[in-house]
Structure formats: structure tokens, C-alpha cells
Amino acid sequence: MDKRVLLIAGSKSDSEFVNRCEEYLDKLGIGYNTEYSSAHRDPERTSQLAREAEKSGYEVIICLAGMSAALPGVVAAHTALPVIGVPLDSSALNGMDALLSVVQMPPGIPVATVAVGKPGAANAAILAARILSIKYDDIRGNLDKYRESIKQK
């Protein structure tokens, strides 16, 4: 399975959210790679991951970040690939700070923003599947099956 999605989280302490996203990517049959890189603690590595993502074969980037949540915007500034930001509820403000940071991007540097926390991590994977399903029939089929299964619930 080709790795089409790059997941970047700011810290290994975000693993529970990353795992949720990976679970949904697995369900949808989408290959991915996960990296941990902080926009604040390791900005050089973070920008390098973003700049090299497309030539590495990735087609969508999902960034999971809490608190000031600069990661999705920093990544979006260094790539033309679609970036999906997942604000995490990892602060005393229950993710409201992260949500506002991710959703308020300046014109020209868009980041698709999903819900806060684990629901957002799941939706980020599903949104990535929707983006990729335009090009890949197998992902479209998996997405259709998933959508049918949630109707049955």
C-alpha cells in the first residue's frame, strides 16, 4: 500500500490522537507515515518534512497539535499539498486555544480544520480519504463501504 498521507504530531504525548487517526486510515485502506516534530521545538525539521512531503509521494498532510497549535499553519506555509489540522484538547482551555489557532489562518495559507480531539482525528482521516477518492477508485470504494456501515449503526 502506497503511503499517501503524512501524519505529523507535535509531540509523542499526542499519541492517543494519532492512534485514532491511524485507526481510521487503516479502516479506509490508506497508507501513511507518522512523524513527531514540533513547530516550536524543532522548526527546521518540521519545515523540511513539509517541503519534502510531495516529492516523497505524499498527497495529503494531517497535522495534530494542541495549545498554540502552530504546526498545521507552519506546515501549510511550506507545501502546496492539502493540510488538515486537528486541534487537540491538551491544555487547560480544553482545545479552544488550538481550535482558534488552526482555524484562523491568513489568506493564502489554508488549513482544513476538523473537530477538536479524537472526533477530529477520525474526521481528518475521513477527509483525507475524500480528497484521495477523487483520484483513487479503491479508496472511493472503501469510503463508500465505510459510509454504508455508519448508516447501519
Image: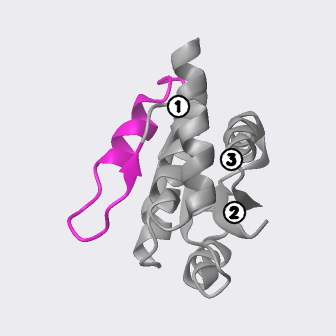
Frontmost residue, 75 versus 53: 53
Residue at mark 2: 37
- Frontmost of labels 1 and 2 is 1
The boundaries of the magenta stretch are 91-113
The Cα atoms of the two marked residues, 1 and 3, are separated by 14 Å
From the viewer's perspective, is residue 50 above or below residue 6?
Answer: below
* Badge 1 element: helix
In the image, residue 96 lies in the stretch drawn in magenta: yes
In the image, residue 143 lies in the stretch drawn in magenta: no
- Frontmost of labels 2 and 3 is 3
Residue at mark 3: 25
Q: Earlier in the sequence, mark 1 or mark 2?
A: 2
Residue drawn at 44 percent across, 66 percent down? 82
| Percent of width and height locating residue 108 | 24, 71
* Badge 2 element: loop
Q: Is residue 16 at all visible to an observer of this figure? A: yes
Residue drawn at 52 percent across, 61 percent down? 132
Amino acid on which disc 1 is placed: Arg
From the viewer's perspective, is residue 81 above or below residue 100?
Answer: below
| Percent of width and height locating residue 6 | 65, 64
Q: Quadrant of the N terminus?
A: bottom right
Q: Which mark is residue 147?
A: 1
Direction from residue 151 to residue 103 in the image, left or right: left
From the viewer's perspective, is residue 116 above or below residue 153?
Answer: below
- Frontmost of labels 1 and 3 is 1
| Percent of width and height locating residue 135 | 49, 68
* Badge 3 element: helix
